[in-house]
């Protein structure tokens, strides 16, 4: 059990900062584009987008209840752990799958961009908009249902 806890702790030390700073990493890589790195970014971006969707969906709900002065009742009023944890996992899954689908649609649409010297740099610059697009519906949902 202790070995598993240490492994999860190390994994979180590596993954959470990477997911948080992923947009900045993409912009830094866009300065010196590399096709191999772009493929890695393509497959890691949904994890980062899912993380941000999860954090925003839970934070905005709790923040709204905090404004009402009922933060201590938030979990009980939302069904307890049995309902809030699966709902949070659903938001995470939506962020991951939605981001991946948006990236695939972006890659398919980007094929029509004329070939030029800075095409990869352009792809990396606009890639983040596709990768983090699931945050827009999350924001709209939370604005309406909180």
Image (spheres, rainbow, N blue to C red):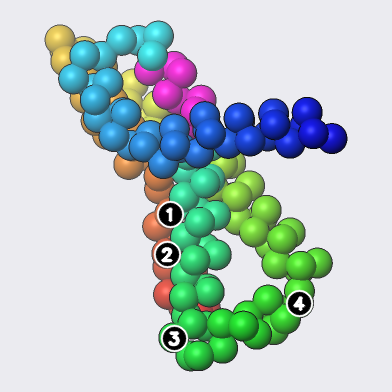
Task: Please tell me which residue is depicted at 84% across the width and 35% down the height of the picture.
Answer: 1
Residue 12 seen: yes
Residue 43 is inside the magenta segment = yes
Is residue 93 found left or right of 108 in the rendered image?
A: right
> Foreground mark, 3 or 2?
3
Question: Which secondary structure dominates the residues rendered in magenta?
Answer: helix
Task: Please tell me which residue is depicted at 70% across the width and 31% down the height of the picture.
Answer: 6
> What is the x, y in percent for residue 18?
44, 32
Check whether the beta carbons of the residues at disc 1 and disc 2 lie within 8 A of each other: yes
Is residue 89 found left or right of 64 in the rendered image?
A: right
Q: Which residue is mark 4?
A: 79
- Tell me which label, 2 or 4, sits earlier in the chain: 4
Q: CA distance from mark 4 to mark 3?
A: 20 Å
Q: CA distance from mark 3 to mark 2?
A: 18 Å
**Labelled disc at residue 75:** none
**Labelled disc at residue 67:** 3
> Over which residues does the magenta segment extend?
38-46
- Tell me which label, 3 or 2, sits earlier in the chain: 3
**Labelled disc at residue 139:** 2
- Tell me which label, 4 or 3, sits earlier in the chain: 3
């Amino acid at each position: 059990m202790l070995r598993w806890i240490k492994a999860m702790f190390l994994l979180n030390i590596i993954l959470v900062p990477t997911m948080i700073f992923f947009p900045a990493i993409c912009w830094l890589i866009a300065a010196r584009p590399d096709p191999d790195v772009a493929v890695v970014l393509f497959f890691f971006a949904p994890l980062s987008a899912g993380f941000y969707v999860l954090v925003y969906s839970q934070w905005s709900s709790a923040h709204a209840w905090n404004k009402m002065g009922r933060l201590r009742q938030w979990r009980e009023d939302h069904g307890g752990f049995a309902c809030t944890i699966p709902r949070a996992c659903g938001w995470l899954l939506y962020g991951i799958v939605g981001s991946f689908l948006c990236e695939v649609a972006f890659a398919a649409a980007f094929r029509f961009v004329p070939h030029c010297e800075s095409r990869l740099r352009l792809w990396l610059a606009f890639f983040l908009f596709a990768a983090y697009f699931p945050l827009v519906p999350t924001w709209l949902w939370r604005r309406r249902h909180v």
